[in-house]
Amino acid sequence: MLTMETLPHTDPITLCGIAGYTTLDFSPQAERIERLTECIRHRGPNQQGVHRGPLVAMGAVRLSIIDVAGGDQPIYSPDGDVVICFNGEIYNHAALRAELEAKGHRFHTKCDTEVVLHAFLEWDVDSFARLRGMFACALWSESRRRLVLARDRMGIKPLYFMKRGRDVLFGSEVKTILEHPEVERRLDLQGLGYYLSLNYVPQPFTCVAGIEKLQPGCWMEWRNGEMRTESYWTLRFQVDERKKLGAAKEELDALLRDSVKEHLLSDVPLGVWASGGLDSSTVLHYAAQEVPHVKTFSIGFKGRSFDESPYFREIARVYGAEPHEFSLGPEADLAGAIERMSYYSDEPSADAGALPVWFLSQMTRKHVTVALSGEGADELFGGYQTYLADGYAEWARWAPSGLRRLGLGISGLLPVSDEKISLEYKAKRFLEGSLLEPVRAHLFWNGTFDDAGREAIAPRTAGVDWGRLAPAGTDGALNRFLHLDQLCYLPEDILYKCDRMSMAHSLEVRPPFLDHRIVEFAATLPENLKIRGGRLKFVLRELMKDKLPRTIIERRKEGFDIPTHQWFRGALKPLLLDTVNERAVREAGVFSWPAVSAVMQRHFERKVNYGYHLWGLLTLFLWMKRWKVTG
């Protein structure tokens, strides 16, 4: 029979993470699993448990959100044959528990992890499609010598793996694999190529050779050294052109009400991240119906044109919330936070929005353990200006490329602005993108280096395959780009950033928009219910226009990031020069120092705005130094 060893408890709160490896040929010292589990302690500083068997070692750290007093992990089946390590929340666990009890299953805790275990015992891998929530899990069957890994539909919770001969190493964060001394820490050139162009690494790649992401909506089976992966859920855009605005609003209203109510399920204090934008205000609207005087948490940029404090203060006042806010400026410990992020980021996090999310998470965790957020609405309903740019580019491509190149040259004469996304930045970016094929252009709008620029600073990354990222079988130009962002940008940038920065502070963040029923509903909507007449997120905006203040409905969307262009000419310049220097660049063995140096100098001299490019290089080199990853 399997047995569990529990590590000493620390404080009364935890967050979730898993780690493990098989030992068919691999034979590390027995205490290895404790060390791997300890390295993700920030995800669960209270209870840590490990399981050791003849062929597998697994560990878990836990956040006590549901059944605070019980549910320590790992959890075992009644006969001791199957063990589970679980990360996440299952919002329909009560209904599943009742169904399983009717089939004869008996439970010893109230936690959702035990429900997932019994669901697996009853339905095997078909159980994952019955789960509604965010999760990554590992299940081991001793009698069948079988390991199963699974990840939620949208990739809200991370799960990495590495094949090592006939064995597999896995964990919630890359560091659970890097901590194995046998693993060679080399850059993956394909992953690096994507990173330098996109500022994130699309699935299944990572920046480390040999380490992959288990793709969302998939499970993996390891049995006696053989591995296979299958999908249990695939999003399909099956548009119902008959669907009208009134019916769509009614359906979305019911779905949001139900999802937010489920996401509020908790035995510990919770709140809402409130930016004053449409998405987070929608979540607050439905949350306030269930939780009076709910706490809100917000980040402002005092004195900046993109400061959102008037909006998030207004929405907190409207709903009688208990507001908490933090003003982020150059006087904050920016360099210290960025350097600490290199540990918790796990992979290089090149979205400059990670920095305000770091400080937002830090503030939020002082008051609550769980926060609801508005992630996902932009990718489901069409909330980015890039979707408009895609349409404008189709028209622009009717003009001769030479004319567009001339326009690009003229735009280079515009004065360089310190604003986050200024008119001159958008004009240059749009004209450059119009010269690319549509999928590459869409990725370029939110990315950084073009192919020529990327190959200049990292010549060995030539030949990035952009076509493999394009989703197949999606009808409609807008839907094709929405689907692309749901597969790439959402899980690998937005959700990645949110998970790592919040978990660094032992905070769980839940995105109600990403209930898979809402995702599937959005995929059925005609495109004119998503964007109409230049109005982004049309159906959501129409649903909420009689619920939210007019100022919230009509306000222009602001990106949640820092003024990188300005700060790299000021507050962050010393950190950049100290990190991305000639010695570090040459030692990496992948980059061209003259090309990298030229990028920095052109930015410092205000010839061009390369703030987002430099953020990507800074976080990459901090990460490489912290984890001793080389080319």
Image (spheres, helix red, strand yellow):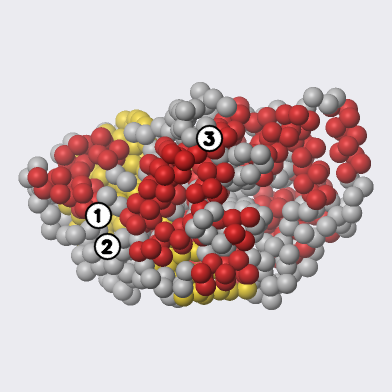
Identity of the amino acid at label 3? His
Q: Secondary structure at mark 1?
A: helix
Q: Which residue is mark 3?
A: 483
Label 1 vs label 3, nearer the camera = 3
Q: Which residue is mark 1?
A: 112
Label 3 – label 2 distance at C-alpha: 33 Å
Mark drawn on residue 66: 2
Is residue 368 in sight in this rendering?
no
Residue drawn at point x = 83 percent, y = 49 percent: 424
**Considering the image in quadrants, where does the C terminus appear?**
top right
Comes first in the chain, label 1 or label 3:
1
Query: Residue 420: horizontal and vertical position, in percent?
Result: 73, 57
Q: Check contact, mark 1 vs mark 2: CB within 8 A.
A: yes
Comes first in the chain, label 1 or label 2:
2
Quarter of the view holding residue 221: top left
Q: Check contact, mark 1 vs mark 3: CB within 8 A.
A: no
Relative to 151, say whether 51 is above or below. below
Q: Secondary structure at mark 2?
A: loop
Q: Is residue 610 left or right of residue 89?
A: right
